[in-house]
Image (cartoon, rainbow, N blue to C red):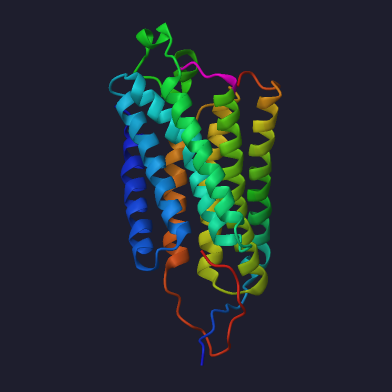
């Protein structure tokens, strides 16, 4: 068994529980979507744990659907809800994401598994072997790329934009640093996933672990209470 | 009266934060470029 995905899974589900616990109070949509995105993240790493013990085509499909297709997009959609204030835009994008996710589910569930599944090696990462086992048509590949681009630009770009605003206005230092950590954390698995898709180096397990640790630390920092320094009011700025 | 959330920028928040922001933005750009290159078939496999 590979222990890095197991650690990532435990941390990710704790992280998801923290986010959803905060969501329960005022029920802001961005926290719900981040919680769902983190559950997808955890299901992806949990699939890696299972695939490092035994092979199942359905677990491989779950890994591809959650880890490669849905996680980034749903996390990014949370940031879209947080930052896009124009009425109806975030809701329209949410409908498009919902439909794209449903299509992804159907396509991956129906994707044929090749005979290479018989030679699956549990000692190697699933990311090194899935291309020979899971038949992906052009639409699956296109959806994977579009969902990842949308999610990565939304999540990383949104966190960088928030951090920049806090830095420029010199307010909420904890949120500025928290957003930097979230951006760095989100970028790690996104870069690693891009490398895997492009057939380059495979450091997916390590990037998933570091990514969730940094994002969790960033979230805790950004949402921590900050002591007031003086009595001067602060200007308004978007907050995570 | 509302309490302030302002902080006094130190040397490292003035200089290091923009550098980190630029590095992360470049990382984001690199990710997008790799994805586009892979779509165009300019990387080993897709």
On the image, the x and y values in percent for residue B41 come to 69, 20
Q: Is residue A149 magenta?
A: no
Residues in magenta, as a range: A134-138
On the image, the x and y values in percent for residue A184 come to 55, 49
Q: Nearer the viewer, residue A238 or A176?
A: A238
Identity of the residue drawn at 61% across and 25% down: A198
Q: Is residue A28 above or below residue A47?
A: below
On the image, the x and y values in percent for residue A121 come to 36, 15
Q: Is residue A19 above or below residue A64?
A: below
Identity of the residue drawn at 31% across and 37% down: A6
Q: Is residue A27 above or below residue A170?
A: above
Q: How many marks?
A: 0
* Residue A68 shows up from this direction: no
* Residue A222 shows up from this direction: yes
Q: Nearer the viewer, residue A65 or A172?
A: A65
* Residue A19 falls left or right of residue A176: left
What's the magenta bit mostly, secondary-structure-wise?
A: loop
Q: Is residue B10 above or below residue A70?
A: below
Identity of the residue drawn at 48% across and 83% down: A228
């Amino acid at each position: 068994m590979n222990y890095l995905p197991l650690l990532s899974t435990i941390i990710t589900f704790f992280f998801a529980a923290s986010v959803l616990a905060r969501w329960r109070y005022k029920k802001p949509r961005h926290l719900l979507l981040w919680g769902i995105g983190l559950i997808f993240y955890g299901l992806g790493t949990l699939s890696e744990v299972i695939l490092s013990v035994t092979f199942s085509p359905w677990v491989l499909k779950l890994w591809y659907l959650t880890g490669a297709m849905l996680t980034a997009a749903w996390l990014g959609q949370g940031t879209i809800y947080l930052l896009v204030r124009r009425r109806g835009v975030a809701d329209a994008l949410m409908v498009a994401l919902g439909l794209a996710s449903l299509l992804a589910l159907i396509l991956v569930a129906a994707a044929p598994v090749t005979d290479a599944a018989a030679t699956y090696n549990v000692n190697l990462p699933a990311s090194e072997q899935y291309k020979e086992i899971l038949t992906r048509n052009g639409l699956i590949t296109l959806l994977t790329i579009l969902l990842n681009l949308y999610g990565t630009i939304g999540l990383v770009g949104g966190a960088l934009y928030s951090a920049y605003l806090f830095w420029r206005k010199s307010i909420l230092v904890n949120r500025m640093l928290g957003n930097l950590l979230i951006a760095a954390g989100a970028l790690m698995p996104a870069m690693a996933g891009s490398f895997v898709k492009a057939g380059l180096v495979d450091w997916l397990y390590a990037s998933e672990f570091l990514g969730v640790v940094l994002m969790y630390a960033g979230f805790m920092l950004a949402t921590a209470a900050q002591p007031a320094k003086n009595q001067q009011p602060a200007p308004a700025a978007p907050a995570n | 009266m509302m309490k302030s959330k302002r902080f006094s920028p130190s040397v490292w928040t003035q200089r290091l934060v923009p550098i980190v922001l630029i590095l992360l933005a470049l990382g984001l750009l690199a990710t997008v470029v790799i994805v586009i290159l892979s779509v165009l078939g300019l990387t080993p496999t897709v």
